[in-house]
Image (cartoon, helix red, strand yellow):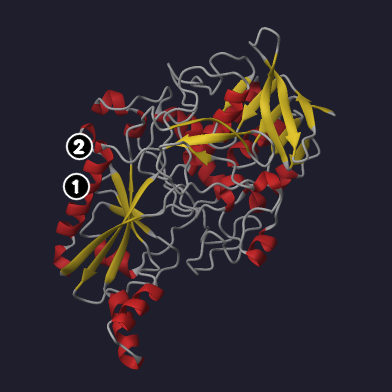
Amino acid sequence: MSVDADVVVVGSGVSGVLVARALLRAGRHVTMVERGGRKSHARQLADGAHATGAPGAQPSHEVAPGSPDYPWATVFGVGGATLHWDGVALRFVESDLRMRSRYGVMRDWPIAYDELLPHVEEAERLLGVAGAPGGDLPPHPYSPVDEAIRPLLAPFRPLGQARPTRRVGDRPPCCGSAVCELCPVDSRFTVLNTFGDVLEHPRLRLLTDVAAERVLLDPARRRARGVRCVRAGGEGFDVAAPAVVLAASGFENPAILLRSGLDRPGTGQFLFDHAHRTLRVRVRRPIGAGIGSSQSTGLSDAFRDGPFRARRGAGVVSAYNPGVPLPGLVTDALLRGRRGGRLRREVLDERDRTIVLDVLLEDVPRAERRVTLSPGKDAMGLPRPRVAYPGPGRYEQAGWRWIRDEVERRLAPLGVVAVRADPGPAGGHLLGTCHMGDGGVVDADLRHHDVEGLHVTGGSAFPTYTPAHPTLTVAALALRLGAHLARS
């Protein structure tokens, strides 16, 4: 079987769909390859799972021998990671792209912030980001915890998030349930609820339950000519096209390149995630914890940028509005012998006085954090991505200790009784394995350094990472690449 197109796009997440959208508008024919299936939001709500049960939707990676396990959160299906993210859409700051020039650490991005900014603004509009700077969607109102902490953790601002506060297209306004990953009303942005026109476009051929094995190359291995694909039963076929865009994850993009024999330095290296910690701060007076119109509604920039980044990592801090999970508080009270009305009063009082803060950190990219190929095969019969991810480095640890201590000091006027630090959610961002720039895998326009007609986009192209969530910048890079390819 052979399917011809102008461009093959591997991956149907926000990166792949935005690139395809630009190409379709320019009159191109696009084939999109997705190893997972297409599952409606209604079906996701019904069974509580984002992906289908098909072989291609199963996690494909394994832990490298000798490396600690890490809770990577992957999802394969039409919509990609937009199926399971919680909608936070933050801008990077200019320094994030100039870490070497400003602070002498990490590396600079090969593009300027001002060049990326128009695409960031377009991404905010397309994703329906409430509280975007200069946008027309008002932010979610501050929660009671936000109001208590924002004078003490200034500068403080509304949290930009792709959960609109009024209707955007077919998406209803946020319901305020603070249940966001499986949004009850389908308000939070996903590819499925916003770009159905792309998925149904007559010039788009969407191949689901199909994995990209490798990039097809000309005899001189200097030009892409399509993608070799496989179905779960082992059937192989070629998708012929003069241009290929890898828009899959930070595991799949390097794995496809490595299976193609494209192993230039940097391929699969410098993997990084969104380092994440949680602080529970118990204070003397009730502050209304456990209330909010969304999971998080405010953001502290007190630790976001400055000369300190030459020595330690930056962080952003936001209140987790649902507060301390009630089951744990009930269990603790039962173990203390509390029952009946006294148990209820103590549990509610504890939650009401406990601030739960998410702290998101940056880290220095490290070559030993990497993706290689395993001799073992995944459910599609392809070599598995093998992931090595040693623990945090000194830069991140120094940043975390400083932020933890500063938060406790700044919140002292609330009457801090106790502070508890815990690991936070992890594994949601698979970044950096095909980074852009000199010495990287792709150039400033996301073109592969060695192969004409081959582009790699998504978070895997990030040269460095920031404390801010990556999705908005991922979308901006895809918009920039789509505009470039549409002009080519």
Image spot of residue 222 (x, y percent): 63, 10
Element class at badge 2: helix
* Front-lying residue, 158 or 179: 179
Q: CA distance from mark 2 to mark 1?
A: 10 Å
- Judged from this view, the residue extending furthest toward the right is 1
Does residue 40 appear left or right of residue 325 in this picture?
A: right
Residue 444 can be seen, yes or no: yes
Does residue 314 appear left or right of residue 331 in this picture?
A: left
Element class at badge 1: helix
Residue at x 53% of width, y 39% of height: 475
Image spot of residue 422 (x, y percent): 31, 58
N-terminal-most mark, 2 or 1: 2
Q: Which mark is residue 249?
A: none
Q: Which residue is mark 2?
A: 308
- Amino acid residing under circle 1: Trp
Which quadrant, please, contains the C terminus?
top right
* Front-lying residue, 379 or 318: 379
Image position of 355 with respect to 224: above or below: below
Quadrant location of residue 484? top right
Image spot of residue 286 (x, y percent): 25, 77
Image position of 221 with respect to 434: above or below: above
Residue 77 can be seen, yes or no: no
Image spot of residue 34 (x, y percent): 69, 40
Image position of 326 with respect to 315: above or below: below
Determine crowd level at label 2: few under 14, some 14-19, many 20+ residues with C-alpha closer than 10 A. few
Point out the frontmost of discs 2 and 1: 1
Determine crowd level at label 1: few under 14, some 14-19, many 20+ residues with C-alpha closer than 10 A. some
Q: Are marks 2 and 1 in contact (CB under 8 Å)?
A: yes
Q: Which residue is mark 1?
A: 402
- Amino acid residing under circle 2: Phe
